Image (tube, rainbow, N blue to C red):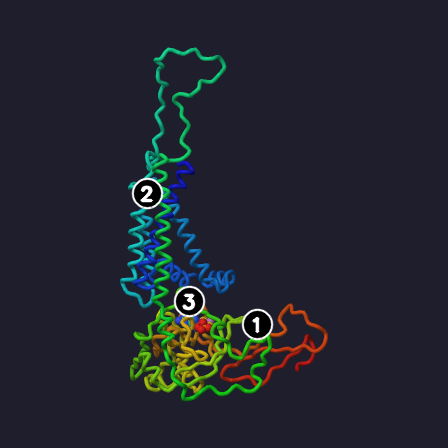
């Protein structure tokens, strides 16, 4: 196969893949964004790749790791699709088998995710069907190159040169004949010009249509998001407002993080490739498992309960010294202690598992949730309903515990169980089942590599020890005394 022919065949494969992915995105408008094959397979990768590889990805791409994953998955898919195109030219069945394998992967990834139904298989199935049709059209159907056959051309049989019947004209000695009879040069491109044009415009139109379907699908899915429902939420006034901030809590220095982290600047960490869109109308929280009274609450039920408002510092266990995976917000919510008191945990139920709509789980010691600290089932963050990416409509916030063991966003279940009986999401991935926050501090000003002038220098920063509190901080310069 000449490299040009191979190029056409690869283009056919990539076009088929584009049509498959684009149409699947459109179908996923109906079945939910997590059923779209790229996102489903990406999610499977997030949940199953070994921890060191994931850490490498995070180290390379930081908070762009999710986009990098989707782009990487897309590029890998394109490479495989090109290969399938080339193989299809040898045997269409190989290409179709490849499409079927991808469909199986997409379906498997989509239907094994939490909270999905059989309909989640549809985007992959329909996409694969259309992709297979496109492949067929290029390889054996209406868009096939003609007269260049897609099957390997049979080498021309060695023939004797045809006997010349015409009497030789008088050739001018030494000059080549004006046309070389018989041996025409091999065509540089497959197919006649008309069929090439058909092939290329077909590919262009299909890729364009796939792009429109894919981006249109994403756009429609975005419009089906819950931003409007979130804006319509009216939060109740707290029966116990947050205590006034002590004077001087916020020094308002340019480089110093403010005492309250604004919602837009609040760090975001989760495993969700697409932010779960949870409709507050249909949302339910179920408190079940080893309890005497199972409880189910609607969002309206929750908002009708007495709410407290508290400043709580949330920190990620992956926050490095001096890092920014920590923030302080004014949360509004229902004390989880009160909900547990009503549910009445049974003896030995020492773990409360928070479960998100996307299946993510965290395990919190029951005792911590009942020890009097302000563990909240929060609905408000800094005076607004929870931002969608921070868990709308409801999440957990537990002072003194790292996010991965306590801060379940998009929460839909609290299940009473025991640490012996259940490992939450990060535990089999190597993180400790219990994650109390250690006291930490960070100097915000001066920053590394700031140029300082001689004389007095302001040193300021933040320190946190959630429910224990900070009574004082000490600094020292090099080996000087602690002050
Ligand atoms: N549903 C869900 N909740 C989650 C997580 C997640 O991956 N999924 N990550 C947790 C982790 S590790 C942290 S540090 C906090 C971060 O909360 P934030 O994104 O609102 O800052 O959310 C926690 N809650
Ligand atoms: Mo975290």
Query: Furthest-bottom residue in view?
Result: 239
Query: For the C terminus, which image quadrant?
Result: bottom right
- Is the CB–ligand 2 distance for label 1 below 8 Å? no
Helix, strand or loop for disc 1: loop
Inter-mark Cα distance, 1 to 3: 23 Å
Q: Nearer the viewer, residue 314 or 348?
A: 314
What residue is shown with label 2? 138
Identify the residue position indicated by label 1 in the image.
322
Ligand 1 within 8 Å of disc 3? The answer is yes
Residue 312 in percent (x, y) is at 47, 81
Q: Position of residue 272 (x, y in %)?
A: 40, 66
> How far across and how far down the image is residue 299, in percent?
33, 79
Residue 289 visible from this viewpoint = no
Q: Residues within 10 Å of mark 1 (few under 14, many from 20)?
A: some
Residue that label 3 marks: 271
The tag earlier along the polypeptide, 1 or 3, is 3
Counting every numbered tag in the picture gives 3
Would residue 117 be found to the left or right of residue 468 on screen?
left
């Amino acid at each position: 196969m000449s490299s040009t022919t191979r190029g056409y065949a690869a283009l056919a494969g990539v076009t088929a893949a584009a049509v498959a992915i684009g149409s699947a995105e459109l179908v996923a408008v109906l079945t939910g964004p997590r059923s779209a094959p790229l996102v489903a397979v990406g999610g499977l990768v997030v949940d199953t790749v070994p921890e060191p590889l994931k850490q490498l990805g995070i180290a390379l791409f930081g908070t762009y790791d999710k986009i990098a994953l989707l782009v990487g998955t897309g590029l890998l898919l394109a490479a495989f699709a090109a290969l399938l195109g080339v193989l299809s030219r040898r045997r269409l069945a190989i290409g179709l088998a490849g499409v079927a394998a991808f469909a199986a992967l997409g379906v498997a990834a989509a239907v094994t995710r939490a909270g999905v139904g059989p309909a989640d298989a549809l985007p992959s199935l329909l996409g694969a069907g259309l992709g297979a049709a496109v492949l067929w059209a290029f390889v054996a159907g209406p868009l096939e190159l003609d007269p260049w056959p897609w099957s390997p051309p049979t080498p021309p049989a060695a023939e004797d040169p045809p006997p010349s019947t015409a009497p030789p004209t008088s050739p001018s000695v030494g000059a080549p004949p004006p046309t070389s009879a018989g041996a025409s040069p091999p065509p540089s491109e497959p197919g006649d010009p008309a069929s090439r044009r058909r092939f290329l415009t077909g590919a262009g139109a299909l890729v364009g249509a796939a792009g429109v379907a894919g981006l249109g699908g994403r756009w429609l899915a975005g419009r089906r998001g819950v931003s409007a429902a979130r804006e319509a939420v009216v939060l109740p006034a707290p029966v116990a407002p947050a205590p006034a901030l002590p004077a001087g809590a916020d020094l308002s220095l340019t480089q110093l993080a403010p005492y309250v982290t604004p919602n837009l600047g609040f760090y975001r960490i989760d495993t969700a490739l697409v932010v779960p869109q949870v409709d507050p109308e249909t949302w339910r929280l179920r408190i079940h498992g080893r309890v005497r009274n199972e409880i189910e609450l609607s969002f309206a039920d929750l908002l009708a309960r007495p709410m407290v408002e508290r400043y709580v510092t949330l920190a990620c266990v992956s926050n490095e010294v001096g890092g920014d995976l920590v923030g302080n917000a004014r949360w509004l919510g229902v004390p989880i202690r009160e909900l547990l008191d009503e549910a009445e945990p049974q003896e030995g139920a020492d773990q409360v598992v928070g479960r998100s709509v996307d299946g993510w789980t965290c395990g919190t010691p029951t005792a911590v949730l009942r020890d009097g600290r302000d563990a909240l089932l929060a609905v408000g963050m800094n005076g607004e309903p929870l931002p969608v990416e921070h868990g709308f409509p409801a999440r957990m916030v537990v002072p003194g515990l790292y996010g991965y063991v306590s801060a379940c966003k998009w929460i839909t279940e609290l299940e009473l169980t025991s640490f012996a009986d259940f490992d939450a999401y990060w535990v089999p991935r190597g993180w400790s089942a219990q994650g109390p926050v250690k006291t930490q501090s960070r100097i915000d000003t001066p920053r590394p590599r700031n140029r300082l002038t001689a004389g007095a220098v302001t040193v300021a920063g933040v320190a946190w020890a959630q429910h224990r509190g900070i009574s004082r901080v000490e600094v020292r310069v090099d080996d000087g005394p602690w002050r």
